Structure formats: structure tokens, C-alpha cells
Amino acid sequence: MKDIFDECQFNDLKLKSRIIRTGTWETETEEGGFLTPAIYDRYEKIASSGCGLIVSEIFALDAKDRFYPYSTNLNYRGFIKDYQMICDIVHKYDVPILGQLAFFYYDDGINQKVEANDITHEGIRKLQAEVIMAAKKFSFAGFDGIQINMGNNFYLARFMNPYFNQRTDEYGGNTENRVRISSEIIKVIKKTMDMHVSCRINPWDVRKGGITADESIAIAQELQNAGADSIQLTARTISQIYDKGVKHPFLVYVDDLIDALDIPVVLGGSLREMNAINDVLNHSDVEYISMSKPFVAQRNINLSKL
Ligand SMILES: Cc1cc2nc3c(=O)[nH]c(=O)nc-3n(C[C@H](O)[C@H](O)[C@H](O)COP(=O)(O)O)c2cc1C
């Protein structure tokens, strides 16, 4: 019988519960080059809530990115100093923390919004170098790892999606090729840094010609083979878990994904009540649950009272 508050080994990280506070921007960005006290306070409350792992809010790669106005930019003056303090606060509660990187647009130096079909090999190398430098920065600040958001409609999600990527070189075509830009990044991070690498991916794409559920499992396997330490799914509402004893299709997909991988998988989306969470834990192979909005709605949340 699995319980929310089981201590568990999440690959290389030790967690004291199965709940992960997932990436959540709160538009409280730094002011005048440094974080405000409210942000330190927020992280302390999350760390003391009983959660097992924290994923930070999105850090944008570039100040011109679409998500920059909502999130903290990785390149502001006080980033390392500020986040060293955040990581120290969180670590006081024996909770590991991953820095989340996500970008919607990429500026290759020629085109501010270059898309998968048009980026040159030099552009790909520049992008990969910037993501690897972001991981280095997270590492300097004391984060236990990086989560690269390659889900939703973020750049790397579009790059691996056949709906957007029609390249004819080694970065397009089959699954391995479309994931290659991400796999190469992961390989370098794992070879050069002691960092957990988590990848947030989509379970499938509703667009005709987009990623299917089977391909998303193949993508996760590619990422695992490159060295990814865990996979987190982007959210899908699973409020109706069983219908007359038949599992929700999303739970069937997650079980297939977990079967196909040797690394931990995190599931989330509309899970915020203890009975429902324990039900998912004990009627599927799911071992880790993520939550976002409950931490925003209840600043002093205590997970043992869900
Ligand atoms: C205000 C807000 C900000 C979010 N920010 C992020 C983010 O920075 N990174 C991310 O991966 N997902 C982000 N999400 C998505 C959440 O991580 C999560 O997948 C979604 O809210 C569903 O989970 P929940 O039902 O537990 O809230 C955000 C969602 C909301 C509502």
C-alpha cells in the first residue's frame, strides 16, 4: 500500500513524500535586480508544507521571451546570490529543489523567433550551449537539478513534434532525430555536472499529425537513454478517475509510460484531495503526484491536512 508520506528514492534524490510542488510562476519577479522578501517567504512555506520536491517557477532563457513578463529571468544581476539563499532555505527542510527552464521563442542571432524548420546547425549549437549554461548557473546557485520544460507548446516541445518539425537532416524525421536537440543537451549536462535532469513532456498532442500517446512514450525512452533522471507529464485533468470500475484513459497511458521506463514519472493535474491522491497511488503504477494551484490558493498549506 503506497502512502503520500512514504519516504522514497526519486532516482538520485531522497524525498520525504510523494508530492511534488510543480513549476508555478506567480508574477512576483525580482525588483531592481534582487528578489523581494515575499518570494523567500513563499519558498519557505512550500518547503515546510510536507512536499517531497520543489520545482521552481519557469526561468526564461531570454528577456525577449513570451514568458519573461510572468517569470524570473535567469540572467538578472542577483540570480545566483538570490537563489543560493532560496536553495539554502528549502534545503533546511531536507527538500530538494529543481530549477525549471522553459522558453517559447528562440533568438538564434538572425531571427528573434526562429522555428524548428529554419534554425541552422550553428543556431542549434548556440541554443544547446545556452541551456547547458543555464544548468551550470542552477548548479552554482545550489539547485539539485534542472527541469527542462519540453511540454506544452514550448520550443523544445514544438521541435520534437512532427506537426512543427519537417526538417530533413539529423534533427528531423524520426522520433530519435526530433528529440536529438534535447538528448544532446542532456548528455552534456549529465557528463559535466552532478545535476538531476527532469524533463517535462506532453502525453500527446490533439493536433492532427502531432505526437501520439505511443510516440510520447518513445520520446520519454529517448530522453531516458540520453540520461534523463525523471519525467514529469504536463497536466491533464483526471478528476474522473474511474467510471463504473473502468480506469480513466490518462491513467492507462501513465501505466504504459511507467512500464516502458526505468526512471520515475510524475503525474499531476487537478489532484488536491488526499483520498483521490491515495486512490491514484494505489490503483495504478503512479508513485509521484504533482500539485500547483493548491500551493497558490493556500499559502500556509499543510499537506497532511489535504
Ligand atoms: C498561474 C500558473 C502558473 C504556472 N506556471 C508554470 C510554470 O512556471 N511552469 C510549468 O511547468 N507549469 C506551470 N503551470 C502549470 C502547472 O505546473 C500545472 O501543470 C497546472 O496548474 C495543473 O496542475 P494543478 O491542477 O495541480 O494546478 C502554471 C499554472 C498556473 C495556473
Image (cartoon, rainbow, N blue to C red):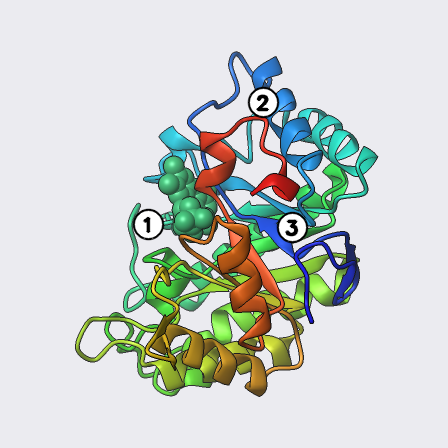
Q: Nearer the viewer, mark 2 or mark 3?
A: 2
Give the quadrant of the C terminus.
top right
Q: Which residue is mark 3?
A: 135
Dot in front, 3 or 1: 3
Is 90 in front, or is 5?
5
Q: Which mark is residue 39?
A: 2
Q: Residue placed at 58% from the left, 77% from the top?
A: 285
Tell me if mark 1 has few (under 14), some (14-19) or many (20+) residues whose alpha carbon lies within 10 angstroms of its own. few
The residue nearer to you, when weighing 60 against 287, is: 287
x then y, percent, for residue 288: 61, 62
Q: Which residue lies under the disc numbered 1?
A: 110
Circle 3 crowding by C-alpha within 10 Å: few under 14, some 14–19, many from 20? many
* Drawn side of residue 129 relative to residue 91, left or right: left
Residue 197 appears in the rendering: yes
Location of residue 38 with respect to 266 vertically, above or below: above
Q: Earlier in the sequence, mark 2 or mark 3?
A: 2
In primary-sequence order, the first of circles 1 and 2 is 2
Amino acid bearing label 1: Ile
Q: Quadrant of residue 266?
A: bottom right
Q: Quadrant of residue 304?
A: top right
